[in-house]
Image: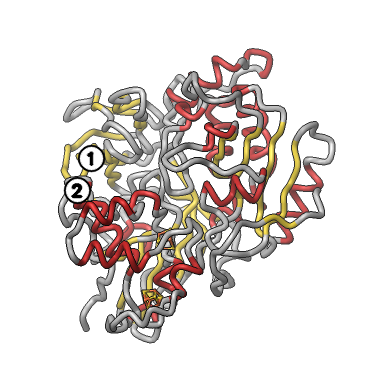
Amino acid sequence: MSSQKATFLDGIHIPPNKSLTDGLKITKCAAPDFVYLPLSMHIGAPAQPIVKLGDKVKMGQVIATAGGFVSSNIHASVSGLVTGFQKRYLPNGMTSNCIVIKNDGLDTLSEEIVPRNESEITPDLIRKQLQEKGIVGMGGATFPTHVKYAPPKDCPAIDTIILNGIECEPYVTSDHRVLLEYPSEIIQGLKYFMLASGAKKGIIAIEDNKPDAIALMSKLVENEPGIEVLTCVEKYPQGSEKQLVYASTGRTVPDRGLPAAVGVVVDNVATAVAAARAIKDNMPLIERVVTVSGNAVNNPGNYLVRLGTLYSDLVEKAAQGYKGDLARIISGGPMMGFAVNSLDFPIIKGSGSLLLFNYDSPFAHVPQEQTCVRCGHCVDACPMFLEPTVIVQAVKQRNWDSAASSSIHACIECGSCAFECPAHIPLVQYIRMGKQFIGGKGEGGCNPFYVIKK
Ligand code: SF4
Ligand code: SF4
């Protein structure tokens, strides 16, 4: 293990608030009676259904195939009967057609899911399995993983794979538990990524607020050539891709560029586990670990959940319902997540957490926006070196040219600026809205300030 503690420039320090769940082992959430599997639970083209109403499906069977190279297959997360195709809202405010499966409760596994010999595993087979088994970034980005291992020809050779075990969002502990409970599969997945890319170096990056995970992973990689654990300073947004590449390698990913432009691929630790299972066991991505936390939930925890499970089923079946008057529901973390108005959303491949707060929580109260006092705190906080107040001024004036020339596209929507703003200006929400206008999507998206009225 390196004794160095890595970090990036600017950013902020925020209370981690992880104690509700960081010591709780992953437990299984019972599979629900129905799952709702969106055809768009990844970045890129929607998948195309290959099942029809009334079809019987087995768990792990492909039910929709990738709609292009940047897309992903979808697999049945339970065995049962296809009972419908429904358009539903996703937590980010977008809609997607969903395949509805009535669970028969048998978990009959698809015949294709048989382990293979390690000797059969080649770089080509790894890329093929990542694509066929629907592996996407599970840290929230949901970018199809196979695409990262087929970089454009003008990119330099990939020499480093970084596994992201940072998890800098408050309350969220799912990756921390994955590090503690699936460490061998994380290392196996990293070795497959290194084999597929030709990278000689693998880095497992973990924030210094997870000393147990750092100690465990460091011990396990002692005799793994080329692999090291990198301890990173607890700072937000340390887990953001560009900031992590800089902290880990000193390289700066160019504006509008991907880490591959500087010879790096970044994958989340949970993605590495899913990849290891896909490659070695032929197991597609049909479940994930989700943290349920906040002061309005009876049984906070880290739950292994079938994809397509509704939030309401997760809260009722695993977290034993909510307590008090539910004031705010956040899909994702409090910094980058989405406030939603119900629990009627399905768990998708990028869903790492669900937070529920009652009226005693500060999250239930959205302070009134005041006039900018030109303090510059937002500029100091911004890890992308932007001037959030200038961008937001342009958005408010609907001056899209000015917003574009102020590099609105480069905003990673981390929320650091808004967190630091003494005038309570919801800077990141204005920026998201501006991006949607510039992208021609109007004012879509969930209301970020949504507080349930008493
Ligand atoms: S402008 Fe964007 S990148 Fe900069 S702090 Fe605000 S949300 Fe983060
Ligand atoms: S932090 Fe808020 S008040 Fe200060 S300059 Fe930025 S927008 Fe204005």
Check the image and report above or below for 181 versus 450. above
How many numbered marks are there? 2
- Find residue 312 and report its horizontal and vertical position in percent: 31, 60
Please report contact status of discs 1 and 2: CB closer than 8 Å, yes or no.
Answer: yes
Circle 1 residue: 98
Q: Is residue 317 visible?
A: no
Q: Nearer the viewer, residue 376 or 157?
A: 376
User: What's the distance in space between the residues labelled 1 and 2, CA to CA?
Assistant: 7 Å
Q: Nearer the viewer, residue 314 or 165?
A: 165
Helix, strand or loop at label 1? It is: strand
Instruction: Inspect the image, locate mark 1, and give the three-letter code of the amino acid beneath it.
Output: Cys
- Find residue 445 and report its horizontal and vertical position in percent: 22, 56
Q: Residue at x 35, y 38 (%)?
A: 42
* Furthest residue toward bottom: 360
Check the image and report above or below for 290 versus 57. below
| Ligand 2 shown in quarter | bottom left
Circle 2 residue: 88
Judged left or right of residue 300, residue 56 is: left
Q: Residue at x 45, y 43 (%)?
A: 255
- Find residue 202 and report its horizontal and vertical position in percent: 69, 36
Helix, strand or loop at label 2? It is: strand
Specify which label sits upstream in the sequence, 1 or 2. Answer: 2
Check the image and report above or below for 391 versus 253. below
The local crowd at label 2, few if under 14, some if 14 to 19, many if 20 or more residues have their Cα within 10 Å, is: some
Judged left or right of residue 61, residue 124 is: right
Image quarter for residue 214? bottom right
Q: Residue at x 45, y 63 (%)?
A: 292
Instruction: Inspect the image, locate mark 2, and give the three-letter code of the amino acid beneath it.
Output: Arg
